[in-house]
């Protein structure tokens, strides 16, 4: 069967060259909402803000890989901006009117596909901003490229007519069910099969295409993937303990990665890209709350902080 990306390839693309002095952080699926009970981003907003400050202070370019704004549940951007003005203040620090100097690269996904045709409406916050469907990264030491896109392009429920039906359900019913504390039936943990199908489609494209793409990085599924293995699949390979719903893969393949999301129950995840030994190096990271032990046995004071943790690749020791 033909891969969907073979017949449809992103049209509005931002091209980047990865050099030794450039560092990238890629995050997706914030689903910033209106701050009510249906807003999945709210519980991680402080973690996310701390991560943004770290990446700005350390010279990273921030790539927002789609579904940043939850515009299926919310009819307008205004309430999202009012709710998260302080977040947009942090994002504004990365932005530059000159597309060659900006450190804020914004990609649209299915939940914020409105930016495909209405990027001008973001202009009051981010003057002259351009919103893209994909990013292609090249680097001097290799002949192939890294493609970054949201990933909904290969999901039948989230493109074309399928997207219209899904959006109708989310806007008319799902946001109210969320307020009643119903769990998302489409989340990665509940649908390992569906996520595997999307991951597999993107992985197959990375393995075989005529566009000189050697690596694909996506979002959309909310499931972090490193070298074509989710963290669950990786643990299964290491321990051989798992359930029938875990698809058995033979091993790693450094052609497909997924950022995960910023709406995990207790953390946000992303992928850092830097040059190392003249080659691109990819790190899967998470940011989460962390407690430090009391300074003395007689003290009952614990300190709550936000901490960056490297998930993959594992570092010995």
Image (spheres, helix red, strand yellow):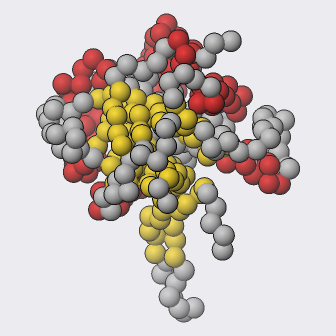
Residue 191 drawn at (x, y percent): 68, 30
Q: Does residue 257 appear anywhere in the picture?
A: yes
Picture quarter containing residue 227?
top right
* Image quarter of the N terminus: top right
In the rendered view, tell whether residue 145 sits above or below residue 299.
Answer: above
Q: Nearer the viewer, residue 229 or 77?
A: 229
312 horizontally vs 81: left or right? right
Residue at point 66%, 70% (across, down): 316
Residue at point 48%, 81% (across, down): 301
Residue at point 86%, 50% (across, down): 240
26 horizontally vs 88: left or right? right
In the rendered view, tell whether residue 316 sits above or below residue 54.
Answer: below
Q: Nearer the viewer, residue 123 or 10?
A: 10
Q: Nearer the viewer, residue 277 or 292?
A: 277
Residue 145 drawn at (x, y percent): 47, 36
In the rendered view, tell whether residue 98 sits above or below residue 220.
Answer: below
* Image quarter of the C terminus: bottom right
312 horizontally vs 262: left or right? right
Q: How many labels sit on residues?
A: 0
Q: Does residue 112 appear anywhere in the picture?
A: no
Residue 235 drawn at (x, y percent): 75, 51
Which residue occupies the extreme top position in the image?
161
Residue at point 51%, 76% (across, down): 292
Q: Nearer the viewer, residue 298 or 51?
A: 51
Residue 76 drawn at (x, y percent): 27, 24
């Amino acid at each position: 069967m033909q891969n969907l990306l073979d017949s449809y390839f992103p049209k509005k693309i931002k091209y980047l060259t990865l050099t030794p002095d450039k560092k990238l952080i890629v995050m997706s699926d914030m689903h910033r909402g209106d701050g009510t009970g249906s807003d999945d981003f709210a519980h991680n907003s402080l973690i996310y803000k701390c991560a943004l400050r770290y990446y700005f202070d350390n010279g990273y370019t921030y790539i927002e890989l789609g579904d940043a704004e939850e515009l299926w549940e919310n009819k307008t951007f205004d309430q999202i901006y009012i709710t998260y003005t302080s977040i947009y203040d942090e994002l504004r620090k990365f932005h530059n009117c000159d597309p060659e100097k900006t450190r804020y690269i914004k990609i649209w996904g299915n939940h914020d596909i409105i930016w495909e045709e209405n990027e001008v409406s973001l202009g009051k916050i981010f003057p002259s901003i351009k919103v893209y469907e994909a990013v292609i990264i090249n680097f001097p030491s290799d002949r192939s490229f890294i493609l970054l896109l949201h990933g909904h392009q290969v999901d039948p429920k989230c493109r074309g007519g399928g997207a219209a039906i899904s959006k109708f359900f989310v806007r008319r019913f799902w946001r109210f069910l969320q307020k009643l504390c119903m769990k998302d039936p489409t989340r990665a943990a509940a649908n390992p099969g569906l996520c595997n199908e999307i991951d597999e489609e993107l992985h197959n494209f990375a393995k075989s295409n005529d566009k000189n793409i050697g690596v694909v990085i996506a979002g959309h599924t909310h499931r972090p993937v490193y070298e074509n293995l989710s963290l669950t699949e990786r643990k299964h390979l290491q321990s051989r303990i798992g359930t029938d719903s875990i698809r058995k893969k033979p091993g790693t393949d450094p052609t497909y990665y997924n950022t995960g999301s910023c709406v995990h129950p207790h953390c946000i995840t992303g992928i850092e890209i830097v040059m190392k030994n003249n080659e691109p190096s990819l790190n899967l990271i998470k940011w989460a709350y962390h407690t430090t032990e009391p300074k003395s046995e007689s003290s009952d004071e614990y300190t709550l902080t936000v901490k960056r943790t490297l998930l993959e690749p594992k570092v010995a020791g």
